[in-house]
Image (cartoon, grey):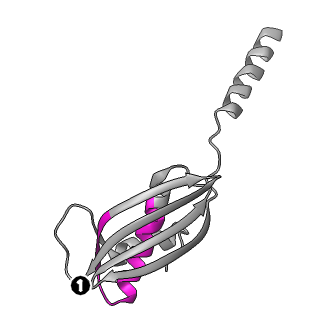
Amino acid sequence: MAAALISALALSGCAEGDAKPVFAPVYDGIETRLLDGDLVNFRVAMRGARDEADVERYAECAAAQYALIRGYGFARHVRTLVTEEGGIWRGDAIYTISAALPRGLKTIDAQVTAANCAENGIPMV
């Protein structure tokens, strides 16, 4: 019986040690700059990102909302540069915005993306 109790305690300790940390990002703001016509630069900052994908998603949400504000329905990702220093993640993203679905593989439907961002609590422009 003592062996069973020790095994149970050992297993419960493993279960607690395997728990994933809770994702609790802090979104520190979005800076938007119109570069030329339909080309837009989004600079975002956040803390608590798990990796570059979280920063890229934050910039994508900004691009989707910006497109909608400007009366456009789509955006196309051009590039995103991500850096991390002292726990602060920064993204510098470029998107084109357009009324019609643009060519390319990295296009987003602004309305669908903005709704998904709102559902996931990711702030937008």
Magenta residues, start to end: 56-78
Count of residue discs: 1
Question: Could you tell me which residue is drawn at 46 percent across and 56 percent down?
Answer: 82
Percent x, y for residue 48? 62, 55
Q: Quadrant of residue 25?
A: bottom right
What's the amino acid at mark 1? Ala
Is residue 61 in view?
yes
Q: Is residue 70 left or right of residue 11?
A: left
97 to the left or right of 119? left
Q: Nearer the viewer, residue 97 or 41?
A: 41
Q: Residue at x 65, y 45 (%)?
A: 21
Magenta stretch prevailing secondary structure? helix
Q: Residues within 10 Å of mark 1 (few under 14, many from 20)?
A: few
Q: Residue at x 23, y 84 (%)?
A: 99
Q: Is residue 77 magenta?
A: yes
- The spot of residue 87 in percent (x, y) is 64, 53
In the rendering, at what x and y percent does residue 27 appear? 60, 67
Name the element at disc 1. loop
Q: Quadrant of the N terminus?
A: top right
Q: Residue at x 74, y 27 (%)?
A: 13
Residue 114 in sight from this viewpoint: no
Which residue is under mark 1? 99
Towards the viewer: 26 or 31: 31
In the picture as drawn, the residue positioned furthest to the left comes out as 103
Rendering coords of residue 11 (x, y %)? 70, 23
Query: In the rendered structure, does residue 71 fall within the stretch colored magenta?
Result: yes
